[in-house]
Amino acid sequence: MKVNENKPLNTTKITKEKLCNIEALRFIFCIIIFIHHYYGKLRLGIYGGELDFLKVNTLNGYMAVEYFFIIAGFFLIYKFKQNQPVTDFIKTKIIRLWPLVAFLFILYMIVGCFGLVKFKLYPNILALLLLENIGITLKWGNIADDWFVSVLFFVSIFYFYIFKYFKKTTYNFFIPIIVLLCYTFLVQQSNGGMGEHIKTYYGIFNCGLLRGIGGMGLGYLIYQFYSYLNNQTFVNNLKSSIIYTVIEGYLFGFVVYETGFHKISFNNRIILVITFCGLFLTFLLKRGFLSKLLDNKFSVILGRYAFALYMTHCFLWHLFKHYWVDSHVNTIIMHPYLTGIGMFIIAFIFAIFAYHCVEIPASKYLKKKLFA
């Protein structure tokens, strides 16, 4: 098969543009996932009060993973290099994703030896091989959030191969159809809830894979809109900036509130996906004050720890539950916000440690070995 030279628009202006505010979005939605897992895993029976309110109103936090897939799909084509071999692309994904998976495998094996958790050997081996959620597994290992990594790994390779070896006109026709079919299936099978990621329907349609394929395909479509709008003449004046700021503020408030802090009454979660796409596009264009405000180096600093925070916070939760929850139930019920904030601070500090002491050194070592 011949390599196609007719590639998507990727001008110098778009390639060199900094998108720091997207790092802020990554970190914010990592916090929402933390909140969702923290209060959702506090299985303390019928406790009522504020803790019960928090558990009910943080149920949609899992939807933030859909947003991560969309962002990943955008940056896959945003940074796409036609001359990069598929094998080199696979190596770069392994370097980026695998170190923290291996780190958590070792941590769970260690704490399992002390009886703090039950170490699930065979599911964890599949997780270590990045095979945890591609439809060939029946149960989770200890590394709960590795399902996202395995889906991201294989779906990224799938789209990279399409961009490299197929004509632009071909995948511009098929990707919207694929996205529509994926989300239609998920919405119908889960009654609007996007489905449990490890579940596989009819022996072949894995929810996690469909969420990844649909989300990353949607990210590609957003790239096409962004490329078009970014090359149009824009009158940058106070009136247009205020209008865009209002749009950004509303979309940001709606997505953050309905995803992380409120049980939306509308039963179809696809509305959150659609709204996030609007928020993502407005932040990419950076025409309002909010997107410009978050477009700074501090956002980049926060964003660099987002992946480590996402991957490691569940491990800390297992330790927290063993050492604190079972013996301090009344404290958690009386101070749900204080204990949640305290746990997040610990998780963030641990994420900083994991990033600097594990993720970066391991990535450098793997890069040296794989690209020797």
Image (cartoon, grey):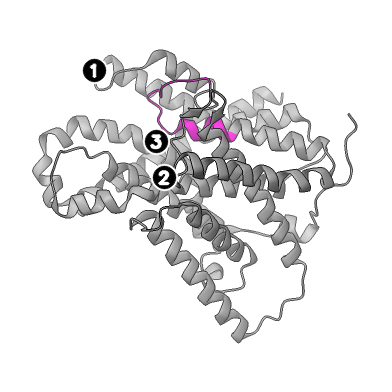
* Residue visible at 45% across and 41% down in the picture: 190
Residue 228 is left or right of residue 105, and the answer is: right
| Mark positioned earlier in the residue sequence (1 or 3) | 1
Q: Residue 41 carries which label?
A: none
Residue 341 in sight: no
Amino acid at pointer 1: Gly
Which stretch appears magenta?
A: 136-152
Mark 1 vs mark 2: in front: 2
How would you rate the neighbour count of disc 3 (Cα within 10 Å): few for under 14, some for 14-19, many for 20 or more? many
Cβ–Cβ under 8 Å for marks 1 and 2:
no
Residue at the spot of label 1:
115
Residue at the spot of label 2:
62
Residue 102 in sight: yes
Report the quarter where the N terminus lies. Answer: top right
Residue at the spot of label 3:
312
Residue 70 is left or right of residue 336, and the answer is: right
Amino acid at pointer 3: Thr
Residue 253 falls inside the magenta stretch: no
In the structure shown, which secondary structural element does the residue marked by tag 2 occupy? helix
| Mark positioned earlier in the residue sequence (1 or 2) | 2
Residue 106 is left or right of residue 13, and the answer is: left
**Place of residue 117 in the rendered image (x, y in percent of width and height, measured from the top left):** 27, 22
Q: In this view, does 159 lie above or below 91?
A: below
